[in-house]
């Protein structure tokens, strides 16, 4: 059975950018990854790159580069942190990404037929808004036994959000970490600060002391 690809098209003035355009990643490249782990890693790299490119405090002068994962979006487009985080949440979840891709195909078919959208002016973006809650690292509980932070979710799982110090160190240059619920589609955006320890000359994540006393 021939593989079905989604071909990104330039965003129309009256339509929001797609999640693929926000992360500057090609749908075809993503679907061609050999394993779900490879696809997840690709989305994660695109998410980190988008945050660095569009973060108000970290943004650098934009240079035009050519990569195999870049879509044909406007180089002048500026996306918000919420847009980038939502795109990451949807595209990093295989089930949500499959549903989102189907909505994009339906939207494209209806647009070409003159219907104009997914339904009553609704777009694929508006149908796939994933819940994202902003929290500080200090607001989360820390488990000394497992050396990880955790938090409950309103879906009922008491430890649905879990991550360790290695995850924080990996996201240290961004100052925030996206953590998905283990049982539902909700996400946490965990904000934290990295402070320099002059005595040990090491980077210490604010809040790590909970598990290192």
Image: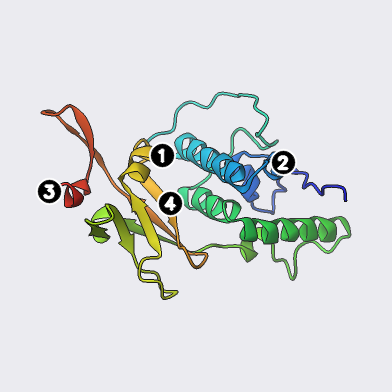
- Secondary structure under the numbered disc 2 in the rendered image: loop
Q: Residues within 10 Å of mark 3 (few under 14, many from 20)?
A: few
Q: Where is residue 1 in the image (x, y as percent from the top left)?
A: 88, 51
Q: Could you tell which of marks 3 and 1 lies nearer the N-terminus?
A: 1
| Residue 137, percent from left and from top | 28, 53
Towards the viewer: 153 or 77: 153
Instruction: Tell which tag, 4 or 1, sits nearer the viewer.
Output: 4
- Structural distance between the alpha carbons of marks 3 and 1: 35 Å
Q: Earlier in the sequence, mark 3 or mark 2?
A: 2
Give the alpha-carbon distance from disc 4 to disc 2, as whole Å: 24 Å
Q: Which of the 4 image quarters holds residue 162?
A: bottom left
For disc 3, the marked residue is 213
Relative side of 211 to 87, left or right:
left
Which residue is outermost to the bottom? Answer: 156
Query: Does label 4 or label 1 sit earlier along the sequence?
Result: 1
Q: Quadrant of residue 69?
A: top right
Real-space Cα distance between discs 4 and 1?
Answer: 18 Å
Please, is residue 190 above or below residue 122 in the view?
Answer: above
Nearer the viewer's eye, disc 3 or disc 4? 3
Q: Disc 1 designates what residue?
A: 56
Residues under labels 1 and 2: Cα distance?
Answer: 33 Å
For marks 3 and 2, give the CA distance: 46 Å
**Given this view, does label 1 or label 2 mark the residue nearer the observer?**
2
Q: In this rendering, which labeled residue sits more in front, label 3 or label 1? A: 3
- Dot label at residue 32: 2
Q: Nearer the viewer, residue 75 or 87?
A: 87
């Amino acid at each position: 059975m021939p593989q079905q690809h989604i071909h990104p098209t330039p965003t129309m003035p009256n339509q929001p950018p797609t999640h693929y355009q926000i992360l500057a990643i090609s749908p075809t490249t993503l679907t061609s990854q050999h394993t779900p782990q490879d696809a997840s890693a690709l989305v994660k790299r695109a998410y980190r790159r988008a945050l660095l490119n569009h973060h108000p405090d970290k943004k650098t002068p934009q240079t035009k580069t050519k990569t195999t994962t870049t879509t044909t979006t406007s180089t002048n487009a500026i996306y918000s942190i919420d847009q980038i985080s939502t795109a990451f949440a949807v595209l990093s979840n295989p089930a949500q990404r499959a549903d989102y891709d189907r909505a994009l195909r339906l939207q494209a078919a209806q647009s070409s037929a003159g219907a104009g959208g997914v339904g009553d002016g609704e777009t694929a973006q508006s149908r796939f808004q994933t819940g994202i809650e902003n929290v500080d690292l200090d607001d989360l509980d820390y488990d000394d036994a497992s050396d990880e932070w955790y938090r409950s979710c309103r879906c009922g799982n008491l430890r649905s959000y879990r991550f360790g110090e290695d995850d924080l160190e990996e996201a240290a240059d961004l100052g925030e970490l996206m953590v998905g619920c283990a049982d539902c589609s909700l996400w946490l955006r965990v904000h934290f600060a990295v402070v320099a320890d002059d005595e040990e000359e090491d980077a210490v994540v604010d809040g790590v002391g909970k598990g290192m006393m």
